[in-house]
Amino acid sequence: MEFALSICLGIGLAAACGFRVFVPMLGLSLAAQADQLQLGAGFEWLDSPVALACFAVATVLEIGAFYIPWLDNLLDTIATPAAVVAGTILTASVVTDMSPLMRWTVAIIAGGGAAGMVQTGTVLLRGTSTATTGGTGNFIISTFELISALVATILAIMLPILAAVLVVAIVGFVFYWLATRQQANATPEKCSPTKQPLA
């Protein structure tokens, strides 16, 4: 049971990285400092005051940067690989009682995959907002992402199983959305028949 909870915790934190990279890292560091969770071997540095301070500063900078018009779209190109890496590290840090090979395999596939899929969904959502509102609606998107990152992080730490279920639902929705968009783009537009002038 402890093994399953650690995987759910890792997946939940990884998904939160898809919304904001540093919010779940800060949450993990805070929880570790408060002895609310156990970190795997080799990840003790996440429990240090230096790491906590760095994550706090990075979180504030990241949150502020996503509220700057057009810079948020530029940051998405950096945030996507960063989210995958952060999700992989966070998952590996909380999955214990497993060989290093298995731990990193699970971390890359489950953690990195969850973070990447959630980040893909946010990029598409922001792109749609930019195209339809000229970027003025991105403030709402940024706020939604921040709240989602906070909620996902708290749920992952307090209720990891519920967090994992929500991650599966989000990833499934992103897959459905991508498939729907691809099908819509692949469907040729039907040309309406032109009316012939009456003689």
Image (tube, grey):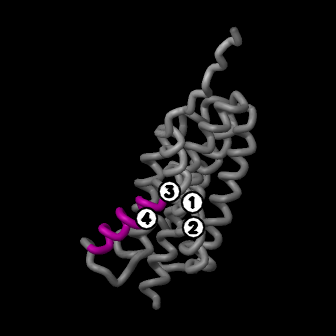
Q: Which residue is mark 3?
A: 175
Q: Which mark is residue 141?
A: none
Residue 134 in the image, given as x and y percentages of width and height: 70, 28
Residue on which disc 4 sits = 111
* Secondary structure beneath label 2: helix
Q: Report the amino acid beneath label 3.
A: Phe
Sequence order check: which comes first, mark 2 or mark 3? 2
- On the image, the x and y values in percent for residue 81 come to 42, 47
Residue range in magenta is 102-114
Along the line of sight, which residue is nearer the eye, 63 or 130?
130
State how far apart marks 4 and 3 are (Cα). 17 Å
Q: Which residue is mark 2?
A: 169
Residue type, numbered disc 2: Ala
* Residue beneath disc 1: 173
- Mark 2 touching mark 4, by CB under 8 A? no
Tell me the residue at 44%/77% (across/down).
7
Residue at image position (63%, 29%) is 70
Separation of residues labelled 3 and 1 (CA atoms): 5 Å
For the residues labelled 2 and 4, the Cα–Cα distance comes to 15 Å
Identify the element where label 1 is drawn. helix
User: In front: mark 2 or mark 4?
Assistant: 2
Q: Position of residue 157 (x, y in %)?
A: 59, 75
Q: Is residue 185 visible?
A: yes
Q: Earlier in the sequence, mark 4 or mark 3?
A: 4
